[in-house]
Amino acid sequence: MPAFWATGRYRSRPFGTVNLTDAGELKGFLRKHGLKADKSLGQHFLCAPDIVQAIVRAAGAYSGCLEVGPGPGILTTFLAKKSEAMSAVEFDPRMVKPLADSAPKCKVIVGDALRVDLAAILEELPEPRVLVSNMPYYITGPLLARFSEVRHLCSAMVLMMQKEVGEKIVAEAKNRDRGALSVNIQSMFTVEFVVKAGGECFMPPPKVDSVVLKLTARNDVFPEGFAKVVKAGHMQPRKTLLNNLGSTFRKDRAEVYEVMKGQKLLETVRGFELTEAQWVSLTESIMKLGWT
């Protein structure tokens, strides 16, 4: 890794290259291409060398890289240097020329990441592959769902998201931030915290902070009804697990409580208090009764 990250400026670098983690160079680069962040697309350009360094380091060793939402190529420039081949999916067609300038090695696909065939794009890249994305806040949930579908094709995913969402994803049992998203993502991935990025790390600065998480796919097999039971148990977080399960599966309290007693779960327990193992056991019991 280059030794010139600390100041945000290269001490020496090849003529003609740009360091878009430097605020001054980024502003000049955007002016050169007549660009401004489009707030309607949730664009906030990362402009912090230490955060970029942390993301590139977290990606580890890879041959193929897919970046979703590269913008003008701030991360792309550095990710491409480590890869044999790189592709990027970008919704904003204005970014094609800037990306050709900042990361000419990268193949740019203009399209909606919620609609394009991510699996096909990944399969064209050499293994091991990594997926990196600074996810727009307004489509974080749908993007996480799409990324989860292709987890078997990636050695790792390094994802930036709103801090509040990241805290939910990493929340363990008994933490009130824990919800269906936490349990489901943790069932599919080993999740590691990488770095926090405050609003000042972006141009223009968003009103909220962000975090970067590294997700590595798990190979564990879960009961078929696992996601449905987890969703049911968190349907209304302020309600007890007993009430949520009864409402979802249309069972009376006595029936639900019998199942919970078999799992040694108290009548007053709420969904966020359960461990992954307890959700698995509860799902198996409910499936045996044919509720799902």
Image: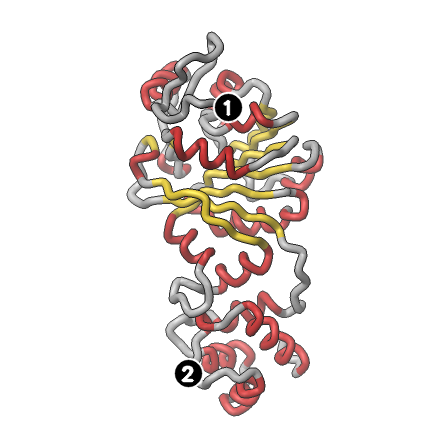
Residue at the spot 57% in from the left edge and 70% down from the top edge: 277
Residue that sits furthest to the bottom in the current view: 254
Q: Judging from the image, what secondary structure is the residue with disc 1 in?
A: helix
In this rendered view, identify the residue nearer to me: 126 or 254: 126
Residue at the spot 60% in from the left edge and 34% down from the top edge: 61
Q: Is residue 207 above or below residue 57?
A: below
- Mark 1 residue crowding within 10 angstroms, few (<14) / some (14–19) / many (20+): many
Q: Quarter of the image containing the C terminus?
A: bottom right
Residue at the spot 42% in from the left edge and 20% down from the top edge: 19
Q: Quadrant of residue 236?
A: bottom left
Q: Earlier in the sequence, mark 2 or mark 1?
A: 1
Q: Quadrant of residue 284?
A: bottom right
Residue that sits furthest to the front in the current view: 3
Q: Position of residue 199 (x, y in %)?
A: 31, 39
**Where is mark 1, residue-wise?**
77
Amino acid type at circle 1 is Thr
Which mark is on residue 268? 2
Q: Is residue 49 left or right of residue 283?
A: left
Q: Judging from the image, what secondary structure is the residue with disc 2 in?
A: loop
Q: Position of residue 155 (x, y in %)?
A: 63, 42
